[in-house]
Image: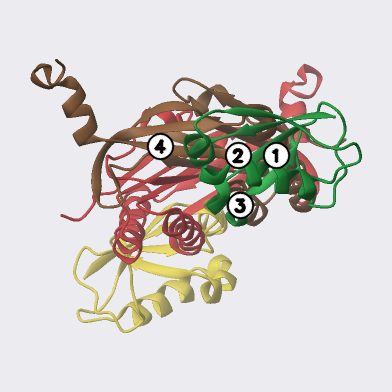
Chain colours: A brown, B red, C green, D yellow
Amino acid sequence: MMTEPLIDIIDGPLHSADYKWSSGSGAVVEFSGIVRGTEEGQLIRGIDYEAFREMALAELGRIARETIEKYELTGCVCIHRVGFVPVGEAAVYVRAEAWHRRAAFEANIEFIEKLKQTVPIWKHPIFASESLAADDPSSSG
Amino acid sequence: MMTEPLIDIIDGPLHSADYKWSSGSGAVVEFSGIVRGTEEGQLIRGIDYEAFREMALAELGRIARETIEKYELTGCVCIHRVGFVPVGEAAVYVRAEAWHRRAAFEANIEFIEKLKQTVPIWKHPIFASESLAADDPSSSG
Amino acid sequence: MLVRFHFYSISKELAGQCEVPLDVPSGSTLGAALDMLFDRMEPIRPLRSSSLFAIGTHYARMDALLSEGDIISMIPPTQGG
Amino acid sequence: MLVRFHFYSISKELAGQCEVPLDVPSGSTLGAALDMLFDRMEPIRPLRSSSLFAIGTHYARMDALLSEGDIISMIPPTQGG
C-alpha cells in the first residue's frame, strides 16, 4: 500500500515532534526552513506568509505523492506556516522517511525544490523599521 | 566565533527536540537513523550498541568541527545512543544548521558518512528468536 | 458566461482588489479570457509574463477551455519554503 | 615498558577478554607491539588486516612510538550510525 503523505498549512507555531514517524522507516530526514533576520540586506522582524490555501494544499499533496512514489518513501510530512512568522521560527517543515538514508535525503531535497517552484505561497517581509515606526507613539497621531 | 558542536553519547531514548537550534540559522537539516526490523534478513527485537566512549566522543567532535568549518555551519548536533535500542527507535541523530539549505544538507550527509567510517561504535543485533528463547520458561530450566 | 479572477500577493496589490468577475464568450480559452482581463486592468499587465494561472486548484495552459463559474487564479512567482 | 591492549566488539569476543597488558621494549613502535600481541593471541589474528588501532583516543599509524602506560585499542570495522 502506498504511503499517504501528511500535509498541512497552519497559522501558528510549527511543532515537528507532533508528527510521529512511521514504522518501517530506517532513515528520517527533516528540513526546517527558518525565517532569517534580514531580507535584501535590511533587518526584519519576521515574514508574513500569504497562501492560496486550497491550491497550496493540492500542490503539496501532488509533490508529496510524486516523491513518495519515486523514492519509495515510508513516510512524508510537509507543514507550511502562514501568517506572521517571527525571525528564528520555522516557516516550513519537510520530512522524508525511507528504508535507507540516501533516498530520504534526496527526496527531501527534491521536495523543497519543487515546493519553491510551484506551491502558491508568497512572503511579505516585515521590516524592523516598519515595526519600530508602528510602535512609536510619537508617529501615530 | 566558530560554532561549537553539541556531541553526546547517551544510554536512553533520544529526544531531538531537546536540542534548540541556534539563532542565525536559516536551514536546519536533521537526520535520524532508526533501528530497522530486520538484520541480514532475520527479524530482530533491536540492536545493542557498544562504544569506545571516550574515543567515539573525540571522533564525533573532530568530525563536527571539520564539518562546521567546511560548511560554515551555525549549529551542529550529534547524539549517538548506546546500549539496547528497540526496533523503530532512533540510534543516531545528526543536525546541521546553516544560513542556506544546501550547505545544511551536504554537511549532514557528509557527517554521517564520516561517522560510519571512523567512530568506534559497533552493533549487536538481538534477534527475535533469541529473545523468544530467553522469554520462554520451558527453555530456561 | 461569468468567470472570476483571483489575485494574490503582488498581483493583488497592483490590482487593488482580490477578485474580479468577467463575462467572457462561451467556449473561451484561458488565453482569450486573460487577453480581455489585461485589456481592462492595466496595472497588472507587467506581471503577465512572469505569472502562472490556475483554473480551480490546478495550473492550466493557455489553450484550456473555460466553463461557467470557473475561478482563475493569477499566481505571481511563488516564494514558499 | 608496560602497555595495555583494549578490545571491542568482535575483537573482544575472539580475544575472550576486553584487556591484555603486554611488556614491550622501550621505544617500540605500534607495529612492533602488535606483532608481539598477535604472536600470543592467535584467535584475533584474522581481524588484524581489517582493524584500525588507536593510541589513547586517536587513530595511530604503525610507526607511531609507544610510551609507558599507553592504551592501545583494537578497532574492528565500525558500525555506528
Q: Nearer the viewer, mark 1 or mark 3?
A: 3
**In the rendered image, which quarter is residue D37 located in?**
bottom left
- Amino acid type at circle 2 is Pro
Amino acid type assigned to the residue bearing label 3 in the image = Arg
* Mark 2 or 3: the one toward you: 3
Dot 1: few (<14), some (14–19), or many (≥20) neighbours within 10 Å? many
Label 1 sits on residue: A59
Q: Give the foreground label among 3 and 4.
A: 3
Foreground: A73 or A132? A132
Mark linked to residue C48 = 3
First in residue order: circle 2 vs circle 1: 1
Mark 4 → mark 2, Cα distance in angstroms: 14 Å
The reply to whether dot 3 and dot 4 touch (C-beta < 8 Å) is: no
Horizontal relation, residue A24 to residue A9: left or right: right
Taking the image as shown, residue B76 lies to the left or right of residue A19, namely left
Disc 1 chain ID: A
**Mark-to-mark CA distance, 2 and 3:** 16 Å
Q: Outermost residue, right direction?
A: C27
Label 4, label 1: how many angstroms apart (C-alpha)? 21 Å
Residue C34, horizontal then vertical, whole percent: 71, 45
Residue B63: x and y, percent? 36, 60
Tag 1's secondary structure?
A: helix
Which residue position holds label 2?
A120
For image coordinates 53% across by 36% down, the residue present is C15
Is the C-beta separation of discs 2 and 1 under 8 Å? yes
- CA distance separating discs 2 and 1: 8 Å
Task: Give percent across and percent down for residue A99.
Answer: 71, 47
Q: Amino acid at mark 1?
A: Glu
In the displayed orientation, state which residue is furthest to the left: A138
Q: Are marks 4 and 2 on the same chain?
A: yes
Per the image, label 4 sits on a secondary structure element best described as strand
Q: Kindly identify which residue carries mark 4.
A: A124
